[in-house]
Image (cartoon, rainbow, N blue to C red):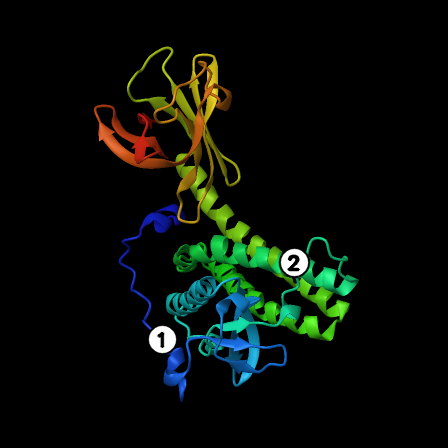
Amino acid sequence: MSILFLTLALGSAAPEPREITWPDPTARGGASTAPETLSERCDGTRSRPLAEATCTRWKIEWSKDGKVWGVTTADSREALVAKRERLLGHARQYARLFELALDDRWSDPTVPICDTCEQNALTAVAGTPPPDAVTAALIETRARLVAFEQEVLDVHAPRLRDIARLAHDPATARLGKAYAKALELAIVDVVHLALELDNAVVFRAKADVERARKAIEARRTALDRAASALVAVVAKAAAKAHAGTYDDDAVSGPGAARLMIDISPTKVIATFAQGEASAVWFEGTVQLDGTLSGRTLVAPEGGTLTCSNYSLDCGYVWAPAQLRFEDRTDARGKRHTVELWFEQSKWLHARPFSR
């Protein structure tokens, strides 16, 4: 079975991984009567929050065997709860798809905690003296960690199902498992390094901050390499199946339009050509599920074009787009067909091209 077919075969008859029992974080002794939120002062004492407006930030601590190993933070309680649920959901899905026991590091989160200690905020305030070297390094490193966390959760984590699917194919099993492991380590590091930086606020050791910064960059590099290796294999299969020149289904003969699709190595360019004229019709990338997603220039809905050129200057606008492929049979025999689909108020498609 080809890699490309496997990535698109969502209805495969392969056996489903076993389900796991998801532990209930509220099932601990006394937890049923615990408040939904707590507030924490600089000395570590906790109580029910009097006013959420006093929160410098919100946090959740993660423990294993009674020891806090990581922390998750957000600017609001709602954002914190949403982030917690994403982490728990990823842990559950990772365990199920790879037939592993649930990592117990995720089984014991605290309730949301309103952190009222201003020293933990570490924000540079306009109009005040510049921070000392350690504080400046902490602010910069925290910003790096926030950016890395967003990259991990918004770019890599949503790919887990595709990663697991590819990890079950012998042709991509090694690379799929390597990417899955790199992703799991990155998520753990995001949470653990947040705690390291919280501790560095107290210890004031610049070496600790530098070590955290290097750990962030090392983990990002490892994750990107693992992702690139797997995507490259899928893109190679997509290029073999779809790259080439397609003829206009509606018009044939001299002067008919053509669509030329190039995939190299993961970037996709589809060029529309008619006679001597040509223009890029689609630009995008190969996704892990084998789709070719990106954008195309389209005439604005309800708008007018100012000139005849196919360009932004003439009033065209970018729209999300995909190239979709299908094998069809007509009077000419079996044809490999491509359609450009694009999104405006709804998804539409341009006329098909075939080869």
Q: Position of residue 300 (x, y in %)?
A: 39, 26
Which is more toward the observer, 354 or 308? Answer: 308
- For the point 31% across and 30% down, the residue is 349
Q: Which residue is mark 1?
A: 22
- Residue sticking out furthest to the left: 331
- From where the camera sits, is residue 197 visible? no
343 left or right of 314 in image: left
* Figure quadrant of the C terminus: top left
How packed mark 1 is, by other alpha carbons closer than 10 Å (few <14, some 14-19, many 20 or more), is: few
Q: Position of residue 162 (x, y in %)?
A: 40, 55
- For the point 40% across and 66% down, the residue is 89
Find residue 217 and name its label: 2
Q: Contact, CB < 8 Å: mark 2 with mark 1?
A: no
- From where the camera sits, is residue 183 visible? yes
Which is more toward the observer, 234 or 274? Answer: 274
The amino acid marked with disc number 2 is: Glu
